[in-house]
Amino acid sequence: MEQLSENTSFEGEDFSSKDISGHEFEECEFRSCNFSESDLSISKFIECKFIECNFSMAKLDRSSWQEVSFLNCKMLGLQFRSVNAFLLALNFKHCQLDYSNFEQLKLKNTVFKNCSLLEVDFTQADLSQANFDSSNLTGAHFENTILEKTDFRNALGYQFDPELNYIRGAKFSQPDVLALLAKYQIDVD
């Protein structure tokens, strides 16, 4: 059952464990809503804002996210790799995205500002010109990832092999950039 909501504000709604698959939301704002374990499969979110929402363990299969921003959201273990990649555009600020998977997605210019990204999988993703300002990337996995002009300044905990990723023009700050030398087992004073 397809349902369209336009220019609507949702506050304090509990969508947890509910099936809202196939719904379409345009220019909507969601504040303090609970989507944990809900089924968002095949749903479309276009120019929507999510503020202080919980998406933990929600199902995202073939859902569309176009020009969507998240602020102070809890998004644990989400499988973004299963979303519809067509016109995918996301921005995250102050979000908890631990254990989520962005494998093989095109995330050019995506902002991850002051986010927790523990153990997140970015394998084969295109993160060109993405910004990880003040985000914690401890245990995040980067392999065959495009990191061209990606901004890691002020990011914490990242460690990946520069030889297994494309990092031309990426920006780093000290001392965290030294983690990129870990595989060489050298001492830097």
Image (spheres, grey):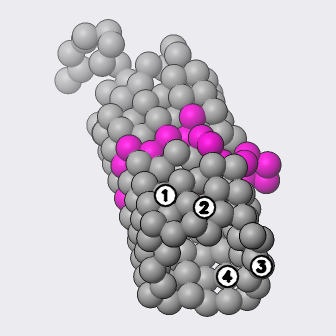
Q: Which is more toward the observer, 32 or 181?
A: 32
* Distance CA(mark 4)–CA(mark 2): 15 Å
Observer-nearest of 93 and 174: 93
Ranked by sequence position, the earlier of labels 4 and 1 is: 4
Is 76 placed left or right of 112 in the picture?
Answer: left
> Residue 2: within the magenta?
no
Q: What secondary structure characterizes most of the magenta part?
A: loop
Amino acid type, mark 4: Cys
Q: Which residue is mark 1?
A: 58
Choose the circle earlier in sequence order: 1 or 3. 3
Real-space CA distance between mark 1 and mark 3, rounded to the nearest whole angstrom: 20 Å
Would you place residue 171 above or below residue 72 in this image?
A: above
The quadrant in which the C terminus is found is: top left
Specify start and end residues of the magenta stretch as a single range. 81-103
Q: Residue at x 62, y 43 (%)?
A: 82
Q: Which residue is mark 2?
A: 40
Q: Amino acid at mark 1?
A: Ala
